[in-house]
Amino acid sequence: MAQVTLNNVRKVYPNGFEAVKPASFAINDGEFVVLVGPSGCGKSTMLRMIAGLEDISSGELNIGDRVVNDVDPADRDIAMVFQNYALYPHMTVAKNIGYGLKNRKIPADQIAAKVQEAATMLNLTEYLDRKPSQLSGGQRQRVAMGRAIVRDPSLFLFDEPLSNLDAKLRNQMRIEIKALQRRLGVTSVYVTHDQVEAMTMADRIIVMNGGVIEQIGTPSEVYHSPASTFVASFMGAPPMNLLNGHAAGGRVRVGDHDLHHHDQDRPLTVGIRPEDIVPDTTGPLQINVSLIEELGAHRLLHGTLQDQAITIHVGKDHPVTTGPIYAAVKPNAVSLFDVESGMRL
Amino acid sequence: MKRAGFSHRWLPILFLVPQLAIIFVFFYWPALHAIRSSFFLQDPFGFGENFVGLKNYTAMFKSAAYMRSAWFTVIFTVLVTVLSLSIALLLAVKADKVIRGAKTYRTLLMWAYAVAPPVAGVIGLVLFDQSWGPIKDFVALFGWDFRLGVNYFDTAFAMIFVSVWKQLPVNFIFFMSGLQSIPKSVREAALIDNRSASGRFWDVTFPLLAPTGFFLLITNITYALFDTFGIIDTIVKGKPGNNPMTLVYKVYVDGFRGNDLGGSSAQSVVLMILVLALTVFQFRLVERRIHYT
Amino acid sequence: MTVSKRFRWSAVLDHSILIMGALLMILPVVMLLQMASTTDVHTMKNGPGLVFGDQLPLNFQKAMFKADGFTGANTGVRMLYNSMILGFGFAIGKIVVGMMAAYAIVYFRLRFATLAFWVIFTTLLLPLEVRILPSYEIVQKLGMLNTYQGLIIPLIASATATFFFRQFFRAIPEELVEAARIDGAGPIKFFVDILVPLSRTMIAAMFIIMFIYGWNQYLWPTMITTDEGMYTLVRGIKQITQVNEGTNLPEYGRSNLLSIIAILPPVLIVIFFQRWFVKGLTESDK
């Protein structure tokens, strides 16, 4: 088991592109950390630097109490699960799982026992003699997991391991991976572009954008107190409503609606989660609803507030119609951001 | 290169050495040697050489025999390419269409790929034999007195016939694979849009085969220029005499038999430039092909 | 669409064209075989005919064991043996050399990788035929005339196999080498444990194409082998047709049967390994 520490770790490609700007953070022993962000944000590069598949341009990376900048991937005591599984197509499931152990010169009987143990854990015992091409997507995913856990690594690395699966299987594997990690207690870094995966699996989330870490925090912190407008709009589906507002005389206003209080007089961006706006016939906001999205358990109302687009999340029991409605904002549910930098105030 | 490639000092060099050594000794050295020789005149008895500048080249282009051979090569190449491509395309389209016996037809039409050119030449010698060649007998019915190895035109005809025969399987295989790579959905869409089979062929199938066709065009030209050597050498029975010959065959005859090293080298250099031009042309087509799919 | 099968004239036409094509390809070889089954005297008078004779065993005997020339070394058996060596030697040599070079180019961080690439791939531009004389001189200087090395190695000096394997290696998912590195496999282990087994079908396809290519070589063996014991079948045919030319009773049976023996191994390979053959051909020439 190990702690991972990054100290000003940076990646610049030979063509001058800075994929990861100097980043520093620490991952605690046994913690499940999810790196999330849009494609090209540098999250995969970050993971690959931790794995040793990509050189670190500057800064220092520690796994456990070792500086591993120049350590070979095989010697970092890590295991990695790839997006396309990267199973060796010509080897059986058992050989795939055991290949890393074989390279460590572990005796064959011990390898067999370990493979068997991993296979039992992952319900793969009947498939040990099959080739990867004879397995379903979910089974391949499990083999990739098996290859990782059989090595007893001090660190698990996941590179979008679920994105090749269909939606139903994805939900199931999400739970399995999380449960397995809890059981083994191995420190894990998980890369995904799917904010639902990030929210549901992570102990802590690291949100990245354009090679920069935007926020590090628990799912709840990231969701409810986003550090920037980018995080606010990236996390959550539908995203947080971001409205142009203005603070004057201690009050924050959007158009002529009073929403919050703020001490300085300045223009600002007002963020409110769709579920934090509730229809209320006596509420202060007048919203013009133009479209209703029926989602079964709840509904989304899309409309405008003073010509600005806004989305409201309402329960299935609430009667809705298009046209003007009145609504109120839940207390303490408003986030304020600087207009220029997008940073939380 | 793979982004996670290995960093190792001497291993990749070790892996590259056999290939590079062979290439330097048996490719670059002879190629440069040919270019150098083309500017020299060798003493026929092996006593040294004299620098003569471009004289070998000017002599070559002034030589009636060379120009005759060049023209024959052009006509030969065009005919072999056009005939074998069009016959192979017809056969491929039909073989792709029929359901019964498709596999048998395919095998029967592609096996001759493995026939060595000189054996194809032997077949030509038999087919056009002076006393009882079946094709010679057949054309005699129309009053054509076929004289292989005697009449320039007749010999050229036999060379083209055999060369086309030998190249049919290659073209057939590539056209078949080109046809099979046309997505089923596209064919089905065409089936709905156009009821005429020939219309479908010219509007949909043929344009989609164009990349294969361009590629084969270059392959066939290269084939006609170089790989027909064995056919020609067998048909003229090693005695070029007054018979038609391609430029490559002439390089061999002048250099190896005639000992005119400088002249032969100059011919080689001209061929090199020709092939180079063809290849550049081909690469540009390949580049364009990427946009096609 | 009607359920019952209708008689279609277009189908008849399609099959007629295909049958004519198939006959065009096959009849000439059947003709060679027929001529090899009759006596040479009969052939000389009548040429090819429709009836097979009983002379095949005798002609086979002559084809395999009789020799021309002064040394008597170029029997059919000897030439078959030489052809096998050329075919196998060329195919194996080319694949081994090509795979190694492609591996170095694709999977290593090399400072001069681009240079190596161009140096190697320029060889695709010029076929052996245009540099045949200087190549001959060099082989002569190296004392490799009438040797198997002299026959095989210069033919390997073009990068078709390297190019082919480079394309194939590049198409292998990146993650495979990454997974192998995390699994503790070094460059040699990765090559032996993963890359070579993964390339099995490619190697088979390439082998077939290269074997046929080597077996069918004509110009180069003609120049490089003057020793009759070094003749290959394809090269030997030339001598037989020349000998036939100068005699009163040409040995049609023997020469035709030798021609058939010369094409038999590659033809059988094409027929029995058709899928790999087509794959090798269509994917290597791109």
Image (tube, coloured by chain):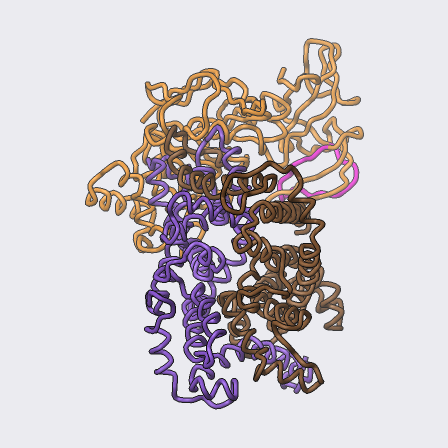
The residue at 55%/39% (across/down) is B49
Q: Quadrant of the N terminus of chain A?
A: top left
The residue at 52%/85% (across/down) is C47
Q: Position of residue B201 (x, y in %)?
A: 71, 67
Which colour represents chain B? Answer: brown
> How many numbered discs, if any?
0
The residue at 69%/70% (across/down) is B153
Q: Nearer the viewer, residue B195 or A35?
A: B195
Q: Answer whether residue A314 is magenta in the image.
A: yes
Q: Answer whether residue A178 is magenta in the image.
A: no
| Chain for colour purple | C
* Picture layout, residue C3 above or below residue C200: below
Which colour represents chain A? Answer: orange
Q: Nearer the viewer, residue B96 or C181?
A: B96
Q: Position of residue B48 (x, y in %)?
A: 51, 39
Residue C102 visible in the snapshot: no
Q: Position of residue A191 (x, y in %)?
A: 48, 33
Q: Position of residue A46 (x, y in %)?
A: 48, 27
* Picture layout, residue B176 above or below residue C105: below
Residue C97 visible in the snapshot: yes
Q: Nearer the viewer, residue C83 or A114?
A: C83
Q: Which residues are magenta?
A: A310-326
The residue at 51%/58% (across/down) is C281
